[in-house]
Amino acid sequence: MRFLSLLFATLLAVILLPMPIVTAVTPGDNLVVEGIPPIPVDLVQKVERYTQFRSAGISSWHPKKREMLISTRFGDTNQVHLVKSPLATRQQLTFFAEPVSGASFQPIDGNYFIFSKDTGGNEFNQNYRYDLDTGETTLLTDGKSKNSGGVWSNRGDRIIYTSTRRTGNDADFYMINPQNPASNQLLTQNEGGGWYGLDWSPDDSQFLALQYVSVNESYLWLLDTSTGEKKLLLPQPGEEKISYNGGFFSKNGQGLYVITDRDSEFSRLAYVELDTLKHTYLSQKIPWDVTDFDLSQDGNNLAFVTNEDGTGVLHILNTATGRFKRLPKLPIGQVYSLRWHQNSRDLGFTLISAKFTADAYSLNVRNNKIERWTLSETGGLNTSNFTDAELVRWKSFDGRTISGFLYRPPAKFTGKRPVIINIHGGPESQFRPSFLGRNNYYLNELGVAILFPNVRGSTGYGKSFTKLDNGFRREDSVKDIGTLLDWITTQPNLDADRILVTGGSYGGYMSLAVATKYSDKIKAAIDIVGISNFVTFLENTEGYRQDLRRVEYGDERDPKMREFLEKISPTNNAEKIKVPLFVIHGKNDPRVPLTEAEQIVETVRKNNVPVWYLMAKDEGHGFSKKKNIDFQFYATVMFIKEFLLK
């Protein structure tokens, strides 16, 4: 008893010892943090609700049941979940440290599905089979190369996918029966990394493939699935550069449904007769880009989405009559991931808007009933009060009109508001109004306006506009931001003396370039996985990407182009950066190598300005793990408070 009493007294004394007070967040061992002050715990508590947004999107319908696979996150990364009916429990099926993507049911029986996963954000995706009866996972690819998810045959016995395993750079076509990994075989060798699979012919004898060269140039090929022989289909030799995007065989196998900018500034939906290659345009009355489409299993309906001044609009076209179906009104936002069920009645899609995060929906095309399949959490915040985007326009240096979307803080913030200019990547991309996630904290709690410009080179405004920043015209897009800075000075509710510029990937380059040219007009810059020197970027990006990027930025192997790229690169103009800089990167980035971040950090530090640096050892081209995204967010809030708001 005496021993037990002494033991109890000792334990009680330990318990009653004063606990150390935690005042700062300790970054994980996976993070390299330089120049960033300790993150106060009270800051984490203040922003916590804005880190708890969740989203969900449809991945695949079950072929026999009215059930779907979705992608959502309950832990640190997006995983595959099964939803058996609208708003039913999301049953998590995969449990990996890395994000899982591209889940696709076997299209006949649905007793297994295929999914993809990389390691540490390196984008060298591997394909796996998940057996629903056992929960077992089987690797289907070599575990080393970069692989696409693949396209199912109509019989559901094979998939064709691309892999770089032969050379490390070229995306060849491989074919496999997922139930027999030993059946894996090389179907066709290709040259270059821009090859993608689209669809099998109704009898599975042919395969439609896309060769992507640039946003303005791509080719459609037909492959013999028995011999691997491939034949160029469109455009024919000698024709002008044309873009094709996506494609499906008609149910009779006599034609193709495609998206193309042939004979147009915008990408239209077209039907192509295989014997004559005649194009019949199906969406010519809609003067906007078609961005996504899917053909119903019976071939009777085409669902497609148009990008109408930044908003996604859903359409359904009867392939026999050419008539459009009248649809129920959807909230203003973005519609994507169109997926027809095998019953040809239910159309699944993902919808997102400024007021709510992404969720999975379905539309019954017979009775026009819309059902919501997931209801994602928003951290307990009332998102109905979140700010809608406002379309703004300004004149650039050459008189061209440039546009963007402005989010203003709530009316409780009075006086001129500081501004964050957030520039999209690509550059062949476009900011389109959507749910802003963590960015809502800057609006709602800090009173900062956010402006998302679509400078020249952006998509969505016609193919001529997209070409305006190519090659030696690269800096014209930077000048668009210069004139935006001048436009802000004319706005009575925006503070031209408090502007921060940020962006990711190509947007990271733009942020650095703006900081070199307009340091006297901004207060700070944030570069996220950005290009700091075009020559070193082109030389060091993964081999399968080099030629694809040279089409956009120029070929660094050409002496004149190399001289120009060196001249405009931020690392060679870094002495002009006189404002605080925050650089964020992933160690395993295959697109923009880590060296791009390291060299700009080293160079700008010589300017005697604050330089913050955050690098994640387990991430690639942008952060995908919640714990890393959260730490980046905490640090960004601190950077904004320190260098924009003071």
Image: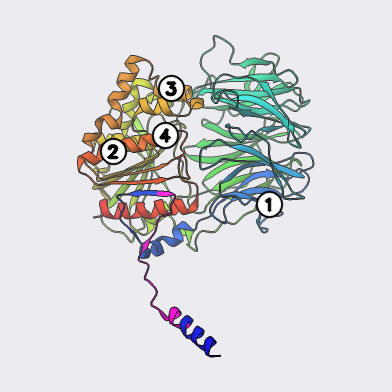
Specify the label residue 566 is tagged with: none
Give yes or no for residue 39 being in the magenta stretch: no
Q: Nearer the viewer, residue 396 or 522?
A: 522
Q: List the residue tagged with mark 1.
A: 82
Amino acid type, mark 1: Leu
Q: Nearer the viewer, residue 27 or 476?
A: 27
Image quadrant assignment for residue 39: bottom left
Asked if labels 1 and 3 touch by Cβ distance under 8 angstroms, the answer is no
Image quadrant assignment for residue 421: top left
- At which x and y percent is residue 53? 50, 56
Give yes or no for residue 23 being in the magenta stretch: yes
Q: List the residue tagged with mark 3.
A: 550
Q: CA distance from mark 4 to mark 3?
A: 16 Å
Task: Determine the residue positioned at 59% across, 29% down.
Answer: 283
Q: Quadrant of the C terminus?
A: bottom left
Density class for disc 3 (Cα within 10 Å; few <14, some 14-19, many ≥20) is some
